């Protein structure tokens, strides 16, 4: 097939690959040639090296990910198809017996055929983030469908400075006229306040919803340390689980202030209001070293750091940070205690993360046993040809 033989829907928007991609992302180095005058956000026909039509994707001329696959096969990824995919994503969440309440992910990028776009629902607000400029058009198409299905009216859309810089684009921070800057939500009986103007990502990390709830069963009467606690999600769930003492630590001063505010929102609901819950503004590595010097021990420790590996250039440094953080934490776990250690680096595969933690445990003279591995919930579906979509990894370890 030559570009002139393409379906009429392709028009003059096509790319021919020099090598076939392994998944739904086509990196720039795999592109052989392209049609002229392609623009960021164009939906293009994807041709294999022999000129056969593979499918349809979202194009950006300056991104390392030149094309993000929308749909395989000859049928075009047109507006009607995208609207249908958005409606299907909403209905899947509403029908799922594992998703309740009104705080969850609605669109999970490649997992829902909306590459470069995530949309989270926080009650009446749909909060979206794009990772490529062209995905803004996908949001424009999906938003009316999402609102119609859910009955919501307010929305936000962000494109952060780092992602924008990578494509020589301008960052975005848009919202509907009536969208609040601050919002209260409830997840598994715990109240939180979101400050959209000072939050990371879409405002909250609903990917840890099930892990936060599961932690409660391990905390009754225990001393709990939540490292990189952000706005207090794990710490508050530990308190709801009857912990005897909870400490949350984070380097983000604004996050610590909001964690304290979230604690105040929940004080009357805690099973033991007299149990101390405190939040500390500190660097995680330095704080853990100080605890070791003071011979501190905790029955339950949670490690939920920010992404340490954003790209291949950061691989070695990121692995070293995961290693060092886990090595410090393992030494602080009381005999028979629990370490819940997490990674949100998509490039780091689960077995690689587990191996990093295994190496961190060597030489400590302690037995470490893996009880279970978990990740995000079913509102974060993952394509089998895109394992990076399962970015969140959580290891539940007993340390003897």
Image (cartoon, rainbow, N blue to C red):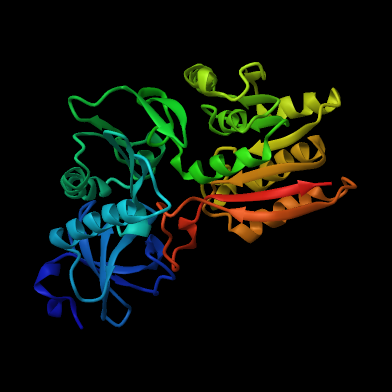
Instruction: Give how far across and how far down residue 2 sits, in percent.
Output: 19, 80
Q: Which residue in the rendered view is the most extreme toward the left?
A: 8
Q: Quadrant of the N terminus?
A: bottom left
99 shown above or below 335:
below
Residue at the spot 64% in from the left edge and 41% down from the top edge: 217
Q: Tell me where residue 334 appears, x and y as whole percent.
A: 82, 36
Image location of residue 5, percent across then percent down: 13, 80
Query: Which residue reaches farthest front?
Result: 271
> Total marks drawn?
0
The answer to whether 339 is drawn above or below residue 81 in the figure is: above
Q: In this view, does 258 lie to the left or right of 363?
A: left
Residue 263 in sight here: no
Q: Quadrant for residue 110, please give it.
A: bottom left
Q: Which residue is drawn at 49% across and 19% down?
A: 254
| Closer-to-camera residue (324/277) | 277
Farthest residue toward the right? 365
Where is 32 relative to 371, above or below? below
**x%, y% of residue 350?**
60, 58
Q: Is residue 262 visible?
A: yes
Vertical placement of 145 versus 102: above or below?
below
Left or right of 86 in this view: 358: right
Residue at the image point whose x is 63% and y is 22% from the top: 272
Identified at 15% across, 76% down, the residue is 6
Give the camera-side residue of 331 and 285. Answer: 331
Q: Is residue 3 left or right of residue 379?
A: left
- The answer to which of 1 and 291 lies nearer the viewer is 291
């Amino acid at each position: 097939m030559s570009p002139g033989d393409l379906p009429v829907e392709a028009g003059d928007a096509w790319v021919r690959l020099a090598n076939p991609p392994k998944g739904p992302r086509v990196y720039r180095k795999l592109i052989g040639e392209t049609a002229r005058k392609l623009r960021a956000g164009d939906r293009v026909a994807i041709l294999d090296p022999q000129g056969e039509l593979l499918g349809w994707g979202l194009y950006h001329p300056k991104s390392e990910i030149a094309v993000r696959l929308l749909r395989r096969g000859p049928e075009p990824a047109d507006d009607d198809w995208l609207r249908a995919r958005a409606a299907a994503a909403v209905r899947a969440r509403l029908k799922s017996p594992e998703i309740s309440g009104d705080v969850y992910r609605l669109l999970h990028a490649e997992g829902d055929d909306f590459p470069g776009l995530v949309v989270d629902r926080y009650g009446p607000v749909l909060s979206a983030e794009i990772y490529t400029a062209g995905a803004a058009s996908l949001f424009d198409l999906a938003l009316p469908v999402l609102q119609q299905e859910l009955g919501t009216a307010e929305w936000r859309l962000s494109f952060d400075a780092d992602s924008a810089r990578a494509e020589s684009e301008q960052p975005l921070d848009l919202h509907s006229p009536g969208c609040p800057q601050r919002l209260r939500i409830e997840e598994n009986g715990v109240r939180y306040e979101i400050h959209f103007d000072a939050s990371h990502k879409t405002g909250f990390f609903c990917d840890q919803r099930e892990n936060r709830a599961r932690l409660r069963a391990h905390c009754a009467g225990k001393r709990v340390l939540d490292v990189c606690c952000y706005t207090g999600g794990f710490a508050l769930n530990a308190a709801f689980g009857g912990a005897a003492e909870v400490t949350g630590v984070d380097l983000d001063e604004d996050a610590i202030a909001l964690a304290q505010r979230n604690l105040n929102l929940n004080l009357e609901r805690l099973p033991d209001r007299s149990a101390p819950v405190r939040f500390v503004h500190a660097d995680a590595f330095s704080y853990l070293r100080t605890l070791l010097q003071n011979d501190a021990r905790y029955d339950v420790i949670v490690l939920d750091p920010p992404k340490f590996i954003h790209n291949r250039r950061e691989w070695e440094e990121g692995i070293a940070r995961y290693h060092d953080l886990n090595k410090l934490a393992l030494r602080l776990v009381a005999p028979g205690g629990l370490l819940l250690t997490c990674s949100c680096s998509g490039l780091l595969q689960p077995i690689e993360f587990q191996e990093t933690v295994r190496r961190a445990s060597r030489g400590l003279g302690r037995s470490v046993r893996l009880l279970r591995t978990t990740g995000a919930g079913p509102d974060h579906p993952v394509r089998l040809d895109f394992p990076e979509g399962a970015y969140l990894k959580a290891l539940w370890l007993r340390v003897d």
